[in-house]
Amino acid sequence: MTDTVISTRPLLAVLVSFAAGMLILATGDRRPNLREGWTIAAALIKFGLVVSMIPTVLAGKVITCRLLTLLPGVELVFRVDAFGLLFGVIAATLWIPTSFYSIGYVRTLNEHAQSRYFFAFALCLSSAVGVAFAGNLLTLLICYEVLTIATWPLVIHHEDGAAIMGGRKYLVYTLTAGTGLLLATVVTYSLAGTLDFTPGGFLAGHAPDGLLMLLFVLFIAGFGVKAGIMPFHEWLPTAMVAPTPVSALLHAVAVVKAGVFGCVRVLLFVFGPNLLRELGIWQAMAGVAAFTVVAAGLLALGQDHLKRRLAFSTINNLALILLGVTLLSENAIRGGILHIANHAFMKITLFFCAGAIYAKTHKDHVSQLDGLGRQMPFTFAAFTIAAMGLSGIPPVNGFISKWFLCLGAVQAGELLFLFVILTSAMLDVAFFFPIIFNGFFREPRPDVAPRIDEAPLIMVIPLCATAAFSVLFGIMPDAVLHFFSITTHAVQQVLGG
């Protein structure tokens, strides 16, 4: 039995950014330096709280903070296991460069409603860490829906027609999905008498196969909306009307990662590998994920808008994560979970680069980027590193997770899905490397100024830092934040190793 450590650190890690949000509102636009100081301070404190839990979890213990008992077997509880800690470390770590980057972005573009922007950002990070540390389905559902509401002001930030439409579509998709999740959670409690996440699942033997299959569909559809599983993906490219730091938040740190995190929680901690095999539904799930991988990659090829191309790339990679986990072999699960972390660092780098380009040139289409690589060399070098990683090219971290995904497909005896994984990597090359080639080797377009410098350092340093960490984690997967060890512990817990 896993040892339990009672601590308030999970709760404090959730609340610190909420408290910062209140201070941001109280400070307002009158003292912008102080307002942004609250953001930076909260990001650093959150990071310290979250990483302080790594040694305890790697020692095989679970950190628990119980808040309130509602019904027998139902309580609001934060419980930090290895899988939850992985997501928590990602969110806490990447909030730091995102905070600095956001300050540079909104000041360079003189964005309006900056206090609202930083307030909503803080609430998103609070709820994202709540999702990571949720100890049961009810706590996860509450934090998941708070994340939905907190993100909406960021999606509609520009308040023009496109932003309002994007925000409306975002709410329709995600709140409808939330209704399905609520129904699935109620049915699960009525069947099993508990909602607590259990490594290897807890639903086996509690209902007929048909009802369990229906429950599975409700859960995966509910979480799969934010994960961008087709055909529930359309809100994601539309939401690219948001400011670029918000897009980075959506794709790397919080929203879509919360969706894929929820799907993996259901697959491994509610149903479990054995039940998924008995029901035979893992094959259908793998098929949907594989279709999404290929279709999203092909759609990305046709996108001239840079952020929309990156959005379809995100859908492609999230589906790759779910495909790996659904194959249920040890290496495939390891590769899928590790890719959650690796993809976060690479994708946030790409969005940071897109934002730096837009802030300096007001160009946001792939066809407009010719020659900019020679004028913004640090930005395009970071873009190149992240694109290499997503294409599975060493020494960037994407190679490690995709290597394990390939090994896992072979281990599972599923050569068709191995072909899908390799096809995904080739598609990544196809829609990223023309951008890199044109940026470095073509002449600038006539409508681009003869000489363009880099974006402000407060934007360039974060994107260089996340690119550098992508390389570091490719060479030393367990460096600094221990992502590989945390992933290995999560896999062992689920498979009983």
Image: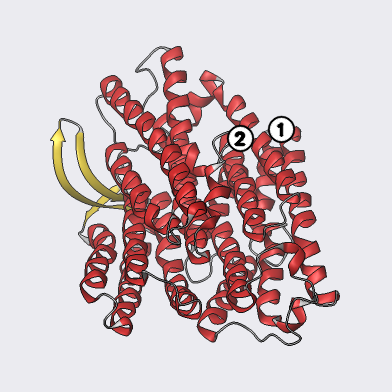
Q: Residues within 10 Å of mark 2 (few under 14, many from 20)?
A: many
Q: Amino acid at mark 1?
A: Glu
The residue labelled by disc 2 is 327
Image quarter where the N terminus lies is: top left
Left or right: 191, with 342 as reference point? left
Q: Is residue 122 above or below residue 156?
A: below
Q: Is residue 492 visible?
A: no
Q: On the image, which quarter does residue 323 sit in?
A: top right
Q: Which residue is nearer to you in this view: 211 or 224?
A: 224
> Going 39% across and 56% down the picture, which residue do you hit?
85
Q: Which mark is residue 414?
A: 1
Would you say the residues marked 2 and 1 are in contact, meaning their CB atoms lie under 8 Å apart? yes
Q: On the image, which quarter does residue 20 sit in?
A: bottom left
> Going 39% across and 32% down the picture, which residue do you hit?
270
Q: Position of residue 87 (x, y in %)?
A: 43, 55
Q: Is residue 219 above or below residue 365?
A: above
Q: Amino acid at mark 2?
A: Leu
Residue at disc 1, secondary structure: loop
Q: Residues within 10 Å of mark 1 (few under 14, many from 20)?
A: few
